[in-house]
Amino acid sequence: MTVLVLGSTGNVGPHVVEALLARGSRTRVIVRNGEKARELFGTAVEVIEGDINDPAVLRSATEGVDAIFLLTPHANTLADLQLRVVRELRRTGIKIVKLSATSSTVRPDGPEASRAHWEVEEVLKASGQPFVILRPNAFMQSAINQIMLPAINATGKLPNPIGTARLSMIDAKDIGNVAAEVLTEPSWDGETLVLTGPRAVSYHDVAELIGEIRGQQIDVLEITPADVRDSLLARGLEPWEAEHFKEMFQLFRDNQSSYVGGDVERVTGRAPGSIEEYLEAAIGNKPAAKQVALSLNGTNSRG
């Protein structure tokens, strides 16, 4: 079986590739930076260097493919690009597994990027293609490694825009394992799967857990979703994206993403990884992408 993975070098893609290789699936990626992909994946993966906005590149990359993992950059052109992919694959029989957004936000009146995901989901469901939709809650990789830990390292405090609300963050490795299962098995076709961690935690919980691992007190700085937007604008983020994050954090603050679902265990047969396990690895200087690269290179060396 051959699977094409889009978005293979971000927070989630490497875990999808790793899980597919563990299943023995032939795996192909389209990337703009072939050198980065080869450094990450070695010779285990077929690397196609090009732009998926180019129809010729997409047609070539999907030749002989059985399924595609649809993940594109967070941008205000997300719907246009993903709908182009769906149209290109229509009537080919290629299964499309779409990585969508936090389930509570995917609606026509949700935050901007979530509205785009909702539009793509609706078209995909009506396309006649075999499909699976994955709706993960917040990624531990982005929330912890890219936001929380840098803030703590810079200021000694954890900014908290969601008040006392809780968030059921998920490890991207679990998303990768679910994706590999549904990409290669037909029994999940037509389903929309909601992916969460095993429990919901508050920012105060996270600060306490990080403090225990580091052996120091981590204070929490109370801020608002509007403060997040203003900070992002001051750092040069585009207004649409800054507003998107403000709306997302407001939904989190309203406790709309504290739900805990069982789809990860239902699909993989294993409970999702806990935030305690993730923090132990992250603070131990073992970011997920590095772990994946080491694992893939180990796979290559074993032949």
Image: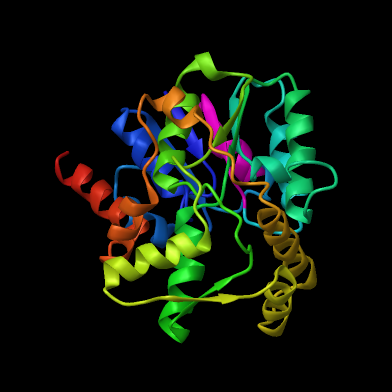
Does the magenta segment cover residue 80? no
Does the magenta segment cover residue 71? yes
Q: Is residue 156 left or right of residue 91?
A: left
Please tell me which residue is depicted at 41% across the width and 48% down the height of the picture.
Answer: 14
Name the quadrant of the N terminus: top left
Instruction: Give the magenta range.
Output: 56-72
Rendered position, 153 above or below 19: below
Question: Residue 166 versus residue 15: which sits nearer the camera?
Answer: 166
Rendered position, 25 above or below 257: above
Question: Residue 118 versus residue 9: which sits nearer the camera?
Answer: 118
Please tell me which residue is depicted at 45% across the width and 24% down the height of the picture.
Answer: 267
In the rendered image, residue 206, in percent from the top left (x then y), is placed at 44, 62
Is any part of residue 33 visible from this angle?
Answer: no
Please tell me which residue is depicted at 72% across the width and 60% down the height of the picture.
Answer: 250
Q: Is residue 45 left or right of residue 186?
A: left
In the rendered image, residue 208, in percent from the top left (x then y), is placed at 39, 66
Question: Residue 173 versus residue 277: which sits nearer the camera?
Answer: 277
